Amino acid sequence: MAKALLGYVGGSDPRVLAEMRRLQQRVQDLESELIRMQAENDMLSAATRRDDSVLDIDVPQAEPALT
């Protein structure tokens, strides 16, 4: 049973172990990128909420566009 599990996980094949390390690093890189993008999105959302006060201005009639 142990040999079967070792063979499934990667055992001592250096190519499989290297690929596992590479994939683990890629997952860590993607998780870091996700955290960075979520923080950037939160910052942009907060900035948008602050700028929404401009949209609350009551204009009784639209002004004609300049031609």
Image: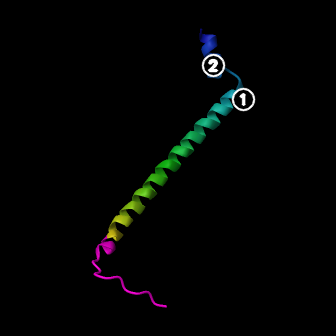
Residue found at the very far bottom of the displayed protein: 67
Q: Check disc 2 and report its element: helix, strand or loop.
A: helix
Q: Which residue corresponds to mark 2?
A: 8
Residue 4 to residue 17: above or below: above
Q: Which residue corresponds to mark 1?
A: 15
For label 1, count other residues whose C-alpha is less than 10 Å away and answer few (under 14), some (14-19) or many (20+): few
Residue occupying image coordinates x 40% and y 87%? 64
Q: Bounds of the magenta span?
A: 53-67
Which coloring applies here? rainbow
Q: Position of residue 60 (x, y in %)?
A: 28, 81
Q: Check disc 1 and report its element: helix, strand or loop.
A: helix
Main secondary structure along the magenta-highlighted residues = loop
> Is disc 2 in contact with disc 1, using a CB cutoff of under 8 Å?
no
Residue 11: quadrant of the picture = top right
Residue occupying image coordinates x 58% and y 36%? 24
Report if residue 57 lies within the magenta region.
Answer: yes
